[in-house]
Each structure stands twice: as C-alpha cells, then as structure tokens.
Image (tube, grey):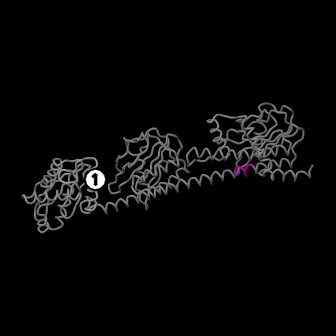
Amino acid sequence: DPTLAPWIVRSVFTGVFASASFAFTRVEIARVRAKGLRSLAEERARVQEESRFFRLAAPATRSEGDEERLFQSSVEELHHSLYHLLRLLHQTLELHTAAILMFDEAKSKLRMVESVSDSDDLAEGPFSPSEGAVGAALKRGEAMNLRNLKPGYGGLVYYNGPALCRAFVATPIVDRGEIVGVLCADRIVDRPFTDREQALLEEATRQVLRALENERVFVQLERSKREQTVLYKASQALGAALDRDAVMKAGLEAAREIVRYDVAAITSFDPEQKKHRVERVEGESIASLEGLEFKDNHSLAAMAVKNRHFLPYRGEYDARSQVVFTKRARIEGMSSLLVLPLVVREDAIGTLVLGSREPQKFPEAVRQTLQVLANQLSVSLANAAAVSRLEEMATTDGLTGCLNKRAFLEELEKRMRSAERFGRKLSLIITDIDHFKSVNDTYGHATGDVVIRELGHVLKRVKRETDIVARFGGEEFCVLCEETDTEGAFQLAERARHELNATVFNTELGELRVGLSLGVATFPEHAAHPQALFEAADRALYQAKNSGRNQTCVA
C-alpha cells in the first residue's frame, strides 16, 4: 500500500537507536553469539579483523591490551547497532535474510559482519566480490533489484547452497566515494521489492555509515584522550625527576606506556668534542652498550642528531645494512627501529632509540606521540643538567674542580658516622704548598693559581675512586680516605708529594718547582669525632712544616 511507505521509512529510522526492545536485543545478540564461541586467540583475531573491516583499526599508541579493549568495545557496539537495524528491516519488510558484507583491507574478499535471517544455511565467507548478484551490484556501483527468482537460484553467495529466495536487493555501502561493503536483503515470498523499499534499503546503508562514523570518532577521541593522559603523566614524572638518571628512567617508562619495545637507549651528544655516548639502555641484548662512546659518524644516531630528524624512514630496520651507533656495536634481531632526536632550543643534545622485534611497530601515529615525549624528555634532561651545574657550583671549587670547604665538611661528618657505625678506618690528609706566599709574590698570582690547580689534579690522580679531594682554602687541600689505615694514607700522601715535586712550572722568570707538606690522622686511632680528626691532621701538617717542610708527618 503506497500510503504505508512513509510510515515505514519513519518507523524504521526512528526506531534504529530507540530504546524499544533494547534489553531484548542484547539478550538476542548474546544468544546468537553463544552459538559461535571461539577460543581466546580466535576471538582476539576476530576483533582485530572486524575492526579493520569497520575501518576502526589504526596504528596504536597505547599498550596492545588497552587497544584490544577499545576495539572490543567499539566492535560490539557496532554489532548491537547493525543487528538492531537489520532486525527492524527484517521485521518491517518481511525479509528472509538481511545481511551486511564488508570488504577486507586488501579489498580482495567480502565477509559477513552481521545478519538477521530465518535461514540456518548462511555462510560467513570470505566471498569473492566478483561472484553472483552481489558481485554484479558491486561492479555496477549501484543497487541491484532482482525479481521473480527461480527457486534454487545460486547467485546469492552468502548462502552455503542454492537459495529459495524469490526477490533480492543488493545495495552498495559507499564511504567517501569508496565502496566498503554491501547491504543484502531477500525474500522467499513471491513479492518483488518496490522502488520505495529499495530506497529504504539505500537509506539504511547511510545509517550503517553513520554508525561506523560514530564509532570511528569515538575510537579517535578515546585514543586521543589516552595519549594525552600518558603524556600528562610523563610530563609529571619527568618534572619530578631532577637528576639525569631519574629523568632517563622516567622517559623510558613513559615510552613503554606509548608502545611496547624490546630495546631502548638514550644517547647524549657533546658538540665541542663531536662525541656521542650511550647513557642508558634497556633490553638484555644491548646491555653491554651502556657507556659506549663513538665519534660523529654516519650512524642513525649521529645522523638523527645532525639533521634533527627521526630515522630510519618508516621505522624499517635491517641490521645488515643499517648502523645504529657503530659497526661493531650492532643491534640484532629487531625488525622495527625508531631514532628520535632530542632537541632543545634548536640544538640536538642526543637521541631516544627504540627497537622492536615486530615489524611496523612505529608508524606515523605512534612516532608523532613519541616525538612529543622526546620533546618533553629533551627539556627535562636540559633542566637536570642545569640543576647539576648549580649543585656543582654550590659544592665545587671553581679553580680546581675539587669539593669546596662546605661540601667537604658535610662529607667528613657523613663518612665519620659511617666509619663509626661499621667499625671502619677513616683517614684524613691535609696538605699545604711550601712557601706559597713567596710564589705569589715572586711569580704572580696567575702562576700561583696554576700551581694550586696542578696540586688539585695531582691529588685527584693519586687518590682511589672512593676517596674525595677538597680545596679547603688558599693553598690548603684535604683528602678523605675511606677504609684506609694510617700507613695507606701515608703512602698516598707521599705519592702526591713526589709527583708535585717532579712537576716543573714554566714561568717568565724561569722554571719553578714547589714542595708540599702533609699531615695524616686516622679514625679511631687519633680522634673520635670529625673536629678532633681535623685538628689531629692539622697538627701533623704543622709538624711537617716545623720539621723542614716538603714531608709527610703522622699525628
């Protein structure tokens, strides 16, 4: 009846997303789905495949688990919407089957993504897009309406065998000018589809597209929200990390939140020395590369710094032909690699390197998010370096690079407590350059500074790694030796004295040699607390001076 057609159109599309029978719909969907339960692995594959059919899948910038859950949610929501639409079409138009077939990514096959049918003989596919009535509709790019079909017609590919259908309509689903699928409807009653009914089915394809677009927007918004959350958390973690090691640790943890990697590294670049250094690594296969130094070469890391641009192109990596750091220090077993420059105020200060055994792990969407992280990491590393310089200025003597008096006294207190707690020896050496006032008066203060600086270098050369050297004031230096008895400290003092004695300073007035007096005291033999230890070593120093200078005396 022509008077019923407008009512049919309104009722179908008013009811698509209405609440009527929604609970029943979900129960019905669950019942239908229960027929085809698959294993967990198969279910994951299905979600990924259907997300690609629906054009939801895009390069992930979150962990695979989160992306899977996002796809699962969106795919299920789409199935709810599409099933509800097909069910209403099925009931309203008295259909035998209503089905939606979608192209795969390669557009080489069709697969049924949703259906409502009175038949138990539906095939899921895949189907050839060139076969039967469906193929003809896709080839023409417009709806195909077949009437008066003979029973047993074999042109409906979504049935496992010949169909009993007497009428059929296939309507291509066109998204932005591209055919992405087809809506199929058939009847077993001998009543052809009218023009109004065909128009209704064509309008239904647009409803399918709206449902798809809604979910695409939802996925994009969710992805964007999650990326912003990750980057915000990364910014907080990087901002809270003040030293370089903490910053690098936070940076790599943030990178792992964006994409799962198998190896990672952060390098630094010294523009004055033209030298790169691998500062931190993650991944057992490259653990030995931490601390590696290499010159400014043609490696990916060096070129990324030089050009301030990510490498390699498209993130594809071949260890046989591409060098990350040096030819000898290769990174094996990776199929994907990304080297991002760390840039601060137009200057590259290093790189962030990520590698994965999986191919195509760093597509553009992932790279762009990682680049934002790299920018944050760059600023945090620069800030950490500035903080380090300020701390160094506050604790270091500017002339010699040794600790200053305040920092030394703090170390003396701390190490004395440790020695007392664990019952260990702690020795203190105090040095004084002989006749230093005469050096300044005769050769000038510039030469005096050279002598002081050289003594600092000598003491740092002869000390052990755990010992500390400080300039206490003027020409006076202190050396604090942990777990060292009096004899050990005496031997160290003598090495320093002999080395300074052998040093020749060339001045405008000729060669200059200087002597060195030293005093040694040890905890707990000579003192029980820091001030007493310092006073004991100081008395030994004056004993050396009063005994003819250029010698070492023990308290």
- Up/down of 376 relative to 65, above or below: below
User: Is 3 on the left or on the right of 407, as rendered?
Assistant: right
Residue 498 is left or right of residue 278, and the answer is left
Residue 292 seen in this snapshot = yes
Q: Which residue in the structure is indicated by mark 1?
A: 417
Q: Residue 181 appears at what percent x and percent y?
A: 72, 44
Residue 513 at least partly seen: no
Residue projecting furthest to the front? 528
Q: Give the overall secondary structure of the magenta segment.
A: helix
Image: magenta residue range? 208-213
Q: Is residue 508 magenta?
A: no
Nearer to me, 525 or 148: 525
Q: Position of residue 284 (x, y in %)?
A: 42, 40
Comparing 349 with 88, the one in front is 88
User: In the rendered image, which quarter is residue 431 located in?
Assistant: bottom left
Residue 532, x across and y down, in percent: 20, 58
On screen, 170 above or below 469?
above
- In the shown orientation, is residue 27 left or right of residue 518? right
Q: Residue placed at 75% from the left, 36% from the top?
A: 131
Helix, strand or loop status at disc 1: helix
**How many numbered markers are drawn?**
1
Which amino acid type is marked by label 1?
Arg
Residue furthest out toward the left: 548
Q: Nearer the viewer, residue 483 or 214?
A: 483
Residue 323 location, quadrant: top left
Which image quarter holds the C terminus? bottom left
Residue 522 at what x, y percent from top left?
A: 19, 51
